[in-house]
Image (cartoon, rainbow, N blue to C red):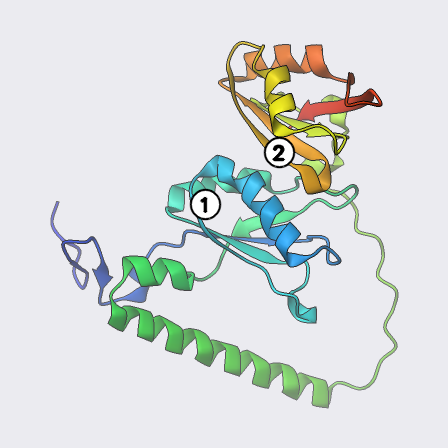
Amino acid sequence: MDAMEGVVHSGGGQVAGDVDQVPIETIYINRLPERIKLEELTEILRAIFSHYGNIKDVVAKASIKRKGQAFVVFDNAESARKALEMDGFEFYPEKPMGVTMAKSRSDVTVMEKGTRELFDQHKRERLTAKERKMAEEAALQQEAPAAVKAERPRAVKTGAAAVPDEYVRPSRVLFLQNIPSEVSQDDLENIFEAFEGFSEIRYIPVRHMGFAEFENEQYAITAKEATANMPIGPDKTPMKVTYQRK
């Protein structure tokens, strides 16, 4: 295949000449809980999205404007595209998260897949865009009259989040909830590895939830039927098992 015009590939596979030639390997996530600690949020997002590929970075900020938002950076664009199926997934009741492709490239991606000159260009463009946005917002605040903030109506569920659990289409990934703190990842693996086609457990103890992944939907269906409401832990708490929403 001939090299693309304006793009130079070095021995290490780096891109030079145009930032636009660097792939976008980042997803943007919003409608996340705002009161959760950043360390906990980062851990949860890594556990959820590591299923789709190797994660290079998770970026979440504590500032008021950026609360409830995060970016997850993968090491390839295909993983990022596959992760979009998590759009509408609820890991908090009544709050389905939004997942879309990021509009810009992450610093990590440009640094690894571009030259130093390309990274410097990317950084300059990002800072310039940020400064322009800040100036526009400041101008709007000066022009807009003071207004009483109306109470926001409660968001109406749409798409996957609006479907009751019993009608969610089968998936090869099971969503596990109501897991007692005394239950470990090893305990969950002991439960699900007894079923044919079991692949892995992704456990998020801080949220008392996890995922059990199987090779295909048929294996997952069998495991779900056998483990739904299974009593686990010292108090025999019923474990809620549903299909991961698509």
- The residue closer to the viewer here, 127 or 239, is 239
Q: Is residue 173 above or below residue 181?
A: above
Quarter placement of the C terminus: top right
User: Picture coordinates of residue 61 (x, y %)?
Assistant: 61, 64
Q: Residue at x 59, y 51 (%)?
A: 42
Give the left or right position of residue 168, taking residue 17 as reference: right
Q: Is residue 207 above or below residue 228?
A: below
User: Picture coordinates of residue 126 (x, y %)?
Assistant: 44, 73
User: Picture coordinates of residue 19 (x, y %)?
Assistant: 31, 65
Q: Using the numbered discs, state the Cα–Cα distance from disc 2 to disc 1 in whole angstroms.
A: 21 Å
Along the polypeptide, which appears first: circle 2 or circle 1? 1
- The residue closer to the viewer here, 201 or 9, is 201
Give the left or right position of residue 56, taking residue 38 as reference: left
Q: Which mark is residue 80?
A: 1
Q: Which residue is mark 2?
A: 203
Q: Residues within 10 Å of mark 1 (few under 14, many from 20)?
A: many
User: Under tag 2, what secondary structure?
Assistant: strand
- The residue sitting at the bottom extreme is 142
The answer to which quarter of the image holds residue 231 is: top right
User: Under tag 1, what secondary structure?
Assistant: helix
Give the left or right position of residue 59, taking residue 114 as reference: right
Q: Amino acid at mark 2?
A: Tyr
- The residue closer to the viewer here, 162 or 170, is 170
Report the number of numbered marks: 2
